[in-house]
Amino acid sequence: MRKETKCIEAGYTPKNGESRMIPIIQSTTFKYDTSADMGKLFDLEASGYFYTRLQNPTNDFVAAKLTALEGGAAGMLTSSGQAASFFSVFNLANAGDHVIASTSIYGGTYNLFSVTMKKMGIDFTFIDPDCSDEELEAAFRPNTKAVFGETIANPALIVFDIERFAKAAHSHGVPLIIDNTFATPVNCRPIEWGADIVIHSTTKYLDGHDATVGGAIIDSGKFDWMAHADKFPGLCTPDDSYHGITYAEKFGKEGAFITKATAQLMRDIGAIPSPMNCYILNLGIESLAVRMKRHCENAQKVAEFLQANENVAYVTYPGLPGDKYYELGKKYMPDGTCGVISFGVKGGRKAAEEMMKHLKLAIIATHVADAHTCVLHPASSTHRQMTDEELIACGVMPDMVRFSVGIENVDDIIEDLAQALEASKNA
Ligand SMILES: *Cc1c(COP(=O)(O)O)cnc(C)c1O
């Protein structure tokens, strides 16, 4: 199946007389005939459902669709993108371990890594995605367990050189984790470029309608854990909490990562989305390919309009010829990048805020990447906890406006921007 077809058809095939849409199995528990039957599930000897804190069939239909779209081997949904980021790293790294992450990642992920996971004893080195080969080599340590980057960084719109970082990670025997939220599997499939694990905030384009918060983790099934068994004891030595099962032995390359993340992390932490939310997410994914095409077409026109506007200081959009990331964007996302643009308003922070006040169609929202056009000033909202130096280091200018182009008629979006930019002159 091609990607447009997978958006509609993958993950669930009704049998004779079954519902066309995925069923919402809104049940915490599942019934078994004998205790022995249930025991097999607890021992991971049989697959099946017993408690929705760990797994639910509705969720798994949608996870299977995303796994097909990303070209992975196994996948799971989480209650948020933050939970997906946390699980993807914590499934590999323990206290005393080290992870390399791009400086250009979502502010919430930066905070999770640099503050919360640091308190758990995991050390992070943040490196510039455009660093030299020497700098990249120097970041690796004997206890490094993973490399983490974002296909298109939110909100800096820096395109990550997936292939380059995958090669570096693999030469040190560790996997590359890619947050593919902004590109979506319709525009980029990081696994084809060497990524081992892909995560998403499904809250953004995948849901696409401001409706549900969620996350996803997809494993390529390609990383050979056993070949690096000394680095990954959690996957390659017996798990006492599962009667001595060794995940990489019992479930192989294809199943080890997601089985451990489900059986251990989801069991203990419980960041599971509700089946109802997964159903809504699935509705969003059905139209993903159509929406992404429109998002990219609209964003291209808006970026060109902004570039030509006298009140705009700079425009960042990887789809614009001349943009620093235009070539990388073309390589990884030949069909288009995303619908998010960032730009500066002449007159700085004050003029940017004035411009935003006058927008009528584009709403101010702590959100991005969905059907409705929305706008945000990262420095005073999502990235508020960062200093100006930290902001600049991760590619977020203090005067930058993040503009998320929706799928309305693009002429309405441009007219709205034109009048608000005109009004910004009075700031
Ligand atoms: C929003 C976002 C997240 C966090 O996801 P939530 O669903 O809000 O928890 C992670 N990564 C990126 C790129 C995001 O845009």
Image (cartoon, rainbow, N blue to C red):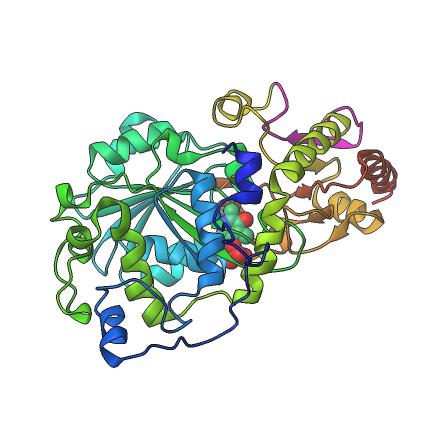
Depth order, front residue of 365/42:
42
Q: Is residue 405 rendered to the left or right of residue 23?
A: right
Q: Residue at x 70, y 29 (%)?
A: 297
Magenta stretch encompasses residue 320: yes
Work out whether 67 lies above or below 22. Answer: above
Work out whether 241 lies above or below 133. Answer: below
Q: Residue furthest front?
A: 16
Work out which quarter of the rendered image holds the C terminus and state it: top right
Q: Position of residue 270 (x, y in %)?
A: 40, 70
Work out whether 288 lies above or below 43. Answer: above
Quarter of image, res 258: bottom left
Q: Position of residue 145 (x, y in %)?
A: 24, 47
Quarter of image, res 17: bottom right
Residue segment shown in magenta: 307-321
Q: Main secondary structure of the magenta part?
A: loop
Depth order, front residue of 292/165:
292
Q: Position of residue 296 (x, y in %)?
A: 66, 32
Q: Residue at x 59, y 23 (%)?
A: 323
Residue 341 seen from this side:
no
